[in-house]
Every structure is written in structure tokens, then in C-alpha cells.
Image (spheres, rainbow, N blue to C red):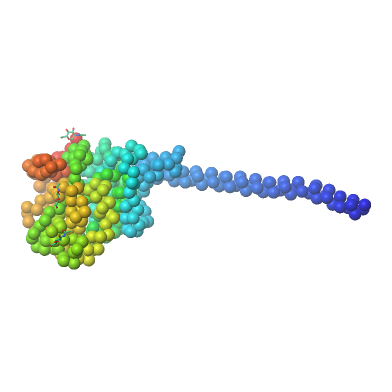
Amino acid sequence: MPIEEGKDSNQRTQSRAFPLKIIKFILIFLAFGIGFSLLSMYMIRYSGFQNIVSTARSGFQPCYEEPDGLNRWVKPPLRLTHTMSDPELLWRASIVPQVKNYPFKRVPKIAFMFLTRGPLPLSPIWERFLKGHEGLYSIYIHSLPSYRAEFPPTSPFYQRQIPSQVAEWGEMSMCDAERRLLANALLDISNEWFILLSESCIPLFNFSIIYKYIKKSRYSFIGAFDDPSPYGRGRYNLNMAPEINISQWRKGSQWFEVDRRLAIYIIKDTLYYPKFKNFCRPGCYVDEHYFPTMLTIEASHLVANRSLTWVDWSRGGAHPATFGRGDINEAFMKRITEGHSCLYNNQPSTLCFLFARKFAPNTLEPLLQFVQYE
Ligand SMILES: *[C@@H]1O[C@H](CO)[C@@H](O)[C@H](O)[C@H]1NC(C)=O
Ligand SMILES: *[C@@H]1O[C@H](CO)[C@@H](O)[C@H](O)[C@H]1NC(C)=O
Ligand SMILES: *[C@@H]1O[C@H](CO)[C@@H](O)[C@H](O)[C@H]1NC(C)=O
């Protein structure tokens, strides 16, 4: 009996001590729980704040209601900076939807891609040209990696520099830069047309005319012609066969306009790239041959074989004429915009050029008087 009693009392003290332990446990859990939720609330608020800051900077509206909805695939990236290497970027940009109908309202945009060394002295012209057409275009700038563009947040050029590398005229690094521009612009699913421009380019007509001309065209505007001279076929190298035949060898100005399909052809290419890299060495000017030749072989039915960018070779020499302040007058502007003939959708047309180069920085002031873009 005493043993039983002892056991009993032991049990009784245990059952009295137990609730206390449970209460302690619950309190500790509660403290943890509250601490945790406070921390996560803080984190959400903090990252939400970050989003708002970057939204305000880039002008895009992220969708809070459905963070994992379709929007993450449809909205352009918030920032153009990224840490992808070129092979990573090209791979990412080559991802193509297989369902042809977009399950959202897609307004096709023109990607204006500026291949520059540093500043864009004619940017006020472009700003005037683009004004009021937000949502129909995107801007991308590839410059020397050391160059930092300083545009105010109100400018369409603000924070539009892509991660860049040094590009040398006539060398493969120039084509690499162009592919880099295309790949970055392809990350925005709404970009449909891709136009390569330089800092000395200007638009010749208002945005509506240019947008319609490009949108209604059955072909992409890339210069491609068969030049029998030493500066054309003379640059062909037999080591490029069998992928590239001399009869397929083309030449054209590097200032192209391509649609999304051709842009993807260009960035995904691994067949022609090594041929040009290895056998179109300085003296060959790879940026005049790679894309025209490749697209002639792969998609000749999609290219207009002419460029949209007017340039003046009439002065002779290795480089086209650069125009200065004294050249800009009404007669000159007429000479650029009128009196041409070409084919547009297989029909004769006098509207052949939408852009022109090369304009020196000091043409800005007189040009602003002549071009209204209204
Ligand atoms: C390449 O050129 C050779 C003759 O030079 C010709 O027989 C062959 O058909 C051409 N190939 C292509 C794909 O055009
Ligand atoms: C462009 O040239 C290619 C031959 O190089 C030709 O097949 C194609 O039809 C031409 N494009 C147009 C629009 O005429
Ligand atoms: C663009 O220019 C054309 C021809 O000059 C004109 O008819 C049209 O109204 C202009 N569009 C805008 C939006 O200014």
C-alpha cells in the first residue's frame, strides 16, 4: 500500500508539474511565431518597397495581384542590367513560344537598338520623334563598357544601356555586339521589329509613318547584294564551303531592320558563325557580310535586300559622307527624302528610306528646326 500510495503521489506531483511545462512550450512557440511573422512582414514590405522604387525608375507597373501569373512572361524585364554571359543570354533569348496565338493583348513594338561608342549627341531629335508613342517602342543602347550614359528619368533613353563589350569595326566583336543587342531586345516579348542604328542616325519621318511602313512590310529590310568586285566576292574564302557557296555570298550595310523571326535566326546561329569568325578576318569586314549572307541562305524569301537607312557614298572613299551644320538646309533634306525608287511589297515606291546617316553632333540645332515629326 505505501508503495502504491507513493506511486500515486508521485503521479500527482507529475500531473501538477506537466501543465506548467506545456504552458512554457506554448509561450516559446508563440514568441517564435510572432517573431517570425514580424520578420516576414518586414521582408515583404521591404521588397515591396524595392519594387516600387524600381517601378518608379523604369516606368513599368508590376502586377501584385498575381505574382506567378502570365505577367512575368509578358512584362518586359524591369531592369536591362543582368549578369548573364553571352552564351547564357543567347540561349535565353532563343526561347520561342510554340503556340502562335498570344493569350493576351500584344501590341507589337519597334526596338530601336543604338550601337554607339559613347554619347548620343542627337538624342533630342529621337526624343522629339518618340514623344507621344509610348508603348510602341523600346530603346536599347550598346556602348563602350566604360561609358555611363547620363539621361534624366524623363528621357526614353534613361537606363536603357545593356551590358556591353568592346566592339571593333569590321571584326566579329561588332557582330557580337549586334547579336547582344538583338538578344537583350528579344527578352521583351512585345518587341516585334528590331532596328540597328548608330549615334549619327536620324529618323526621316514621323513615328506613325515609320511604324506603319515597317508593320505593313512583308519583308525585313536588310541590305544584301551580290557584288562581283574584289570588295564583294573577292572577300569570300573557300574554307567557308560547303556551308557557304560563293554564289550565296552577299554584301550589305550593317544597318538592318529585322522582324522577330529573323532576329532569332541571327542570335541562334551556330552554323555560319564559326565560318565567318575564322575565315572573314580583317580586310573582309565581317559586319558587311555575315547577316546578309546568312539570311540569304536561310530566309531569302523574307528579306527585301535593301536597307532603310540612307547614306551618301557619292563622295568616294572607304567611309560614307558625314554631314555637318553647314549641310543642313531644305534642299538637302529634300534630297534625302525624295526622288528615290525601290520596291515595297513588290510594288514600285518612292518611299525607300526611313532613316539617314551620318550626321555630326553639330547638326543637332539646324536639324531640330527642319524636322518636326508631326
Ligand atoms: C554550290 O556551288 C556549287 C558549284 O560552285 C554548286 O554545284 C552547288 O549546287 C552549290 N550549292 C548550293 C547549296 O548552292
Ligand atoms: C532578295 O534576294 C534573294 C536572292 O538573293 C531573292 O531570292 C529574294 O526574292 C529577294 N527579295 C525580294 C523581296 O525581292
Ligand atoms: C505624320 O506625317 C504625315 C504626313 O506628313 C501626316 O499626315 C500625319 O498626320 C503625321 N502623323 C502624326 C501623328 O503627326
Tell me where residue 197 appears, x and y as whole percent: 21, 50
Look at the image and tell me whether residue 57 can be seen.
Answer: no
Quarter of the image for residue 65 reads top left
Number of on-image labels: 0
User: What residue is rendered at 9% in x and 62% in y?
Assistant: 230
Quadrant of the drawing holding the C terminus: top left
Tell me where residue 75 appears, x and y as whole percent: 36, 43
Quarter of the image for residue 118 reads bottom left
Which is nearer the eye, 310 or 190? 190
Determine whether, in the image, residue 82 is placed left or right of residue 297.
Answer: right
User: What residue is rendered at 27% in x and 59% in y?
Assistant: 270
User: What residue is rendered at 17% in x and 40% in y?
Assistant: 205
Look at the image and tell me whether residue 48 can be seen.
Answer: yes
Tell me where residue 258 appears, x and y as whole percent: 22, 48
> What residue occupies the far right of the structure in this picture?
1
Tell me where residue 324 appears, x and y as whole percent: 13, 49
Which is nearer the eye, 272 or 57? 272
Determine whether, in the image, residue 60 is placed left or right of residue 310.
Answer: right
User: What residue is rendered at 40% in x and 42% in y?
Assistant: 70
Which is nearer the eye, 158 or 95? 95
